[in-house]
Image: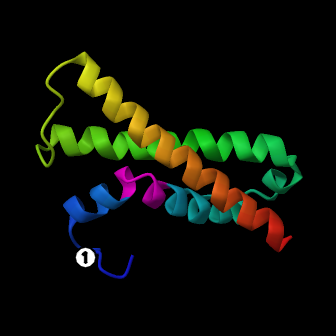
Amino acid sequence: MSNIDWTSLKEVLVWLASGTGAGVAMFALWEMLEKAFPKLNDLNALAERLITLAGTVLMALGAYGIQVGLEYRVPPGNWVEALEQVFAIAAMAIISALAIHGIKQERQ
């Protein structure tokens, strides 16, 4: 994470689309949301996990879509390549979100 140039949109998008970056960003965003909206603390662990999983996947896929739109990344050549990219990004984002959620639950 320390090797990222935070002033470079391209590098931030690459980090977010990695899945791991989206997981870390979602963790930080969720912490801020819990402070801003205390009712979120009343959610059970499953509801929180599902919300953060969905948020992480959407963040990672959104970053990927922006990369393709800005031509930072070569767009997939056909629907199979697009599906493979979406699956790979979503899988990494889910794994990352689950790991981060587990760490958070251990802290409580």
Q: Say left or right for 72 vs 25.
A: left
Q: Say left or right for 3 vs 28.
A: left
The amino acid type, in three-letter code, at marker 1 is Asp
- Please tell me which residue is depicted at 81% across the width and 63% down the height of the picture: 105
Residue 14 vertical placement versus 51 (above, below): below
Instruction: Please tell me whether residue 19 belongs to the stretch shown in magenta.
Output: yes
* Quadrant into which the C terminus falls: bottom right
Using the rendered image of the protein, determine whether residue 30 is visible from the camera's viewpoint: yes
* Residue placed furthest toward the top: 79
- Please tell me which residue is depicted at 56% across the width and 56% down the height of the picture: 26
Nearest the camera: 88 or 29? 88
Main SS, magenta region, reads helix
- Please tell me which residue is depicted at 30% across the width and 43% down the height of the picture: 64
User: Could you tell me how many numbered marks the image carries?
Assistant: 1
Per the image, the residue denoted by label 1 is 5
Quadrant of residue 84 in the image?
Answer: top left
Q: Position of residue 47 (x, y in %)?
A: 79, 40
Instruction: Please tell me whether residue 64 belongs to the stretch shown in magenta.
Output: no
Using the rendered image of the protein, determine whether residue 56 is visible from the camera's viewpoint: no
Q: Position of residue 54 (x, y in %)?
A: 59, 38
Q: Position of residue 101 (x, y in %)?
A: 70, 57
- Assess disc 1: are there few (<14), some (14-19) or many (≥20) residues with their C-alpha within 10 Å of its C-alpha: few
- Please tell me which residue is depicted at 22% across the width and 45% down the height of the picture: 67
Label 1 residue SS: loop
Q: Position of residue 38 (x, y in %)?
A: 81, 59
* Residue placed furthest toward the bottom: 2
What range is drawn magenta here?
A: 16-22
* Quadrant into which the N terminus falls: bottom left
Q: How is the image coloured?
A: rainbow
